[in-house]
Image (cartoon, helix red, strand yellow):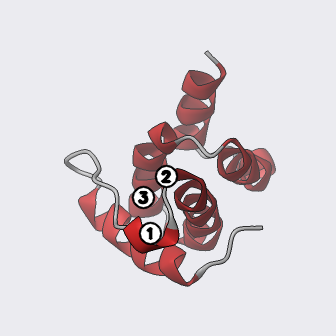
Amino acid sequence: MALYDLRETLETRPRAVMRALLRAAGRIGDASVVPALARVVAEDAALLDGCADALAAIVAGEAPEDERRAPSGPTGASDGLDLLWERAKGARPR
């Protein structure tokens, strides 16, 4: 239930708590938030760095480094996912 709420809240992009939500997404490390991150970036590029940090943390927890590859996303968010993935590859999890 909490993951559902996190995904839904990320997509509404509440400015006052967006940084905290992105940190929470990275700490939780669940790949189910990746499509939400991609949609956020596709609609608001100013959030790219925070979303990329969250994605980098998620990927770091998902697979050994030599097996990491770009996750697939939903139709309609592919541009955001491509941009997000390129930025996240250079980000280090915190």
Relative to residue 93, is residue 40 depicted above or below?
A: above
Give the secondary structure at mark 1.
Answer: helix
Tell me the residue that label 2 is attached to: 37
Badge 3 vs badge 1, beta-carbon distance below 8 Å: no
Q: Looking at the picture, how far across and down is residue 23, in whole percent? A: 75, 53
Front position among marks 3 and 2: 2
Upstream in sequence: badge 3 or badge 2: 2
**Which residue type carries mark 1?**
Leu
Local crowd size for mark 1, using a 10 Å CA cut-off: few (<14), some (14–19), many (≥20)? many
Query: Which tag, 2 or 1, sits closer to the chain's start?
Result: 2
Front: mark 3 or 1: 1
Name the residue located 55 percent from the left edge and 23 percent from the top edge: 4
Image position of 38 with respect to 24: above or below: below
Amino acid at pointer 3: Glu
The mark that comes first in sequence, 3 or 1, is 3
79 or 73: nearer the viewer:
73
State the separation of the CA atoms marked 3 and 1.
12 Å
Q: Are marks 2 and 1 in contact (CB under 8 Å)?
A: yes
Q: Residue at x 28, y 66 (%)?
A: 79
Q: What is the CA distance from the residue labelled 2 to the residue labelled 1?
A: 8 Å
**Residue at the spot of label 3:** 43
